[in-house]
Image (cartoon, grey):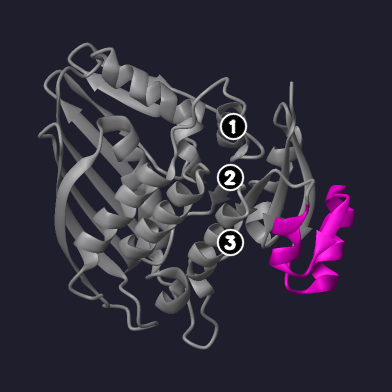
Amino acid sequence: MKTIRWGIIGCGNVTEVKSGPGFQLAEHSELVAVMRRNARLAEDYAKRHGVPRWYDDADRLIADPEVDAVYVATPPDSHLEYAARAAAAGKPVYVEKPMALNYAQCEAMLDACRTAGVPLFVAYYRRALPRFLHIKRLIEDGAIGQVRFVHTRQTKKLTERADALPWRLDPSVSGGGYFFDLASHTLDVLDFLLGPIRSASGQSSNLGGAYTAEDTVSGVYEFESGVQGTGTWCFCGYENVDVNEIVGDLGKLTFSTFGHEPIVQTTAAGVTAHPFEAPKHIQQPLIQTIVDDLLGIGKCASTGASAARTSRIMDEIVGNRR
């Protein structure tokens, strides 16, 4: 069977453990080239990870005849640019999340890939993790009956200093603050578990004053099924909290988006814990589904279409600040 040969544009921190090794460990997959604008860092990454070629120019990597597919692991402000260039070269694209700076850019990426006839995948890797696949099975098997509503609460202590902010808090680079970086995972996995969200609205503000992006967001939304959802995200609170509850007419499921503690199932019969361990390279399961999709032996659940829905909902929730 054919091996999918990958090239990475932007071999930064996310590629060190979370994703990069997954391209080498997935079946029928190989990482053959990496690119970073700093040539010294690109060469260093290639040597440490056993990658045969490195570049400091994205177009050279995209043009490499031995690169079959391109993974864009840069910040969101350059996703559209690199995805469009890779698509124009006829190469499937896998981009980091969030998909782009906003929903309009997501639509442009979809159009570019559709015109070029290449698939587009996005790194919402929770869709392939055993933990969330198990939650999906519990819901589909009626473990909590008919789902009625879902609630999310995510808070984080304010530890950032105004003179040393990460790029994730620069809206011109990331699209927004931690809501776009972190809440995107929650909203996307809820789309996976409960189906697409039809509409959303919300309020957002900056209460901590450490940076200009929103740091407190509240949202309400309705799934196409009629299930209701609410969420509160505060990144300047006094404690770190990460909890989601999906409530049905026979029970509820309680779980975190980012933690690895057991899923808790509560019904009239009692409380059941469902433990799962996190894979060492957390994107590897999703990468495997992408490789299988490209080879025609499986389907990947995290596509440009599904990821664009998540960006649309985020835009609707924080639209008053954007």
Q: Give the structural element (helix, strand or loop) at label 3.
A: helix
Which disc number belongs to residue 85? Answer: 3
Asked if residue 40 is among those painted magenta in the image, a careful observer would answer yes
Question: Mark 2 touching mark 1, by CB under 8 A?
Answer: yes
Residue type at numbered disc 2:
Pro
Residue displayed at 30% across by 39% down:
190
Residue 55 percent location from the top left of the image: 80, 64
Q: Which residue is mark 1?
A: 294
From the viewer's perspective, tell me whether residue 92 is left or right of residue 59.
left
Q: Within 10 angstroms of label 1, few (less than 14), some, or many (20 or more) residues?
A: some
**What's the CA distance linking mark 2 and mark 3?**
11 Å
The answer to whether residue 318 shows anywhere in this view is: yes
Magenta residues?
36-64
Residue type at numbered disc 3:
Arg
Which disc number belongs to residue 92? Answer: 2
**What's the CA distance linking mark 3 and mark 1?**
19 Å
